[in-house]
Amino acid sequence: MWKSLKQECMSCKKCPLWETRHNVVFGVGNPEAEVMFIGEGPGENEDLQGEPFVGRAGKLLDDMLRMIDLDRSRNIYIGNIVKCRPPKNRDPLGTEQESCIDWLYRQIELINPKIIVCLGRIAAMQMIKPDFRITREHGQWFDVDGRKCMALYHPAALLRDPHKRPDTFEDLMTLKQGIKDWCDTYNK
């Protein structure tokens, strides 16, 4: 099922983003992970390489993950709301998100993560609640469809504004404890 989903997604033409993409950025990681990270969409480096979070923001994300014993190749999965790069890295339009969100929902259904971590405002607005306020609600737990969900500042936002890093460090510690508590309880 995973292979056929990926093949279908790779040939998607549901919205105009397909016309300017180099690669569909399906996702990366362990498709049996208990924790799934979701970003908004690929940037230029991701579009060129076909993998999410590979540029400067990706390196920062990898550093953040290492701090809490997570690794994209071992125990998490990373996907995006949209699978193709919006021009000039702009926010994905609502119509683009609507056209693409089914791919993500099908990934979530197959992976069946216990915890979803949204990277940034757009992912949180789509996955947690439409009126999500990242500056007020980052690091807080939400129950969504039987899963624990949290949002962190997007790594690109942390590169632009290093003053957000102390809050993000605290959020990562909350996430680490939540993963331990939730997965231990769930796996009993």
Image (cartoon, rainbow, N blue to C red):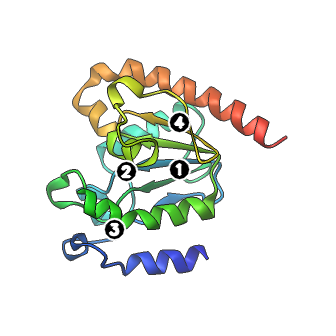
Classify mark 4: residues with Cα within 10 Å, few (<14), some (14-19) or many (20+).
few
Q: Quadrant of residue 13?
A: bottom left
Per the rendering, the mark at residue 66 is 4
Spot occupied by residue 144 in the image (x, y as percentages of width and height): 56, 43
- Give the spatial CA distance, label 2 vs label 1: 10 Å
Q: Judge whether residue 158 can be spotted in this image.
A: yes
**What residue would you read off at disc 2?**
53
Q: Amino acid at mark 1?
A: Arg
Q: Quadrant of the N terminus?
A: bottom right
- Secondary structure at badge 1 equals loop
| Label located before the other in sequence (4 or 1) | 4
Q: Quadrant of residue 73?
A: bottom right
- Secondary structure at badge 3 equals helix
**What residue would you read off at disc 3?**
99
Q: Quadrant of the C terminus?
A: top right
Q: Residue at x 40, y 20 (%)?
A: 167
Q: Amino acid at mark 3?
A: Ser
| Label located before the other in sequence (2 or 1) | 2
- Give the spatial CA distance, label 2 vs label 3: 22 Å
Q: Are marks 2 and 1 in contact (CB under 8 Å)?
A: yes
Q: Residue at x 28, y 19 (%)?
A: 163
| Label located before the other in sequence (2 or 4) | 2
**What residue would you read off at disc 1?**
72
Q: Amino acid at mark 2?
A: Phe
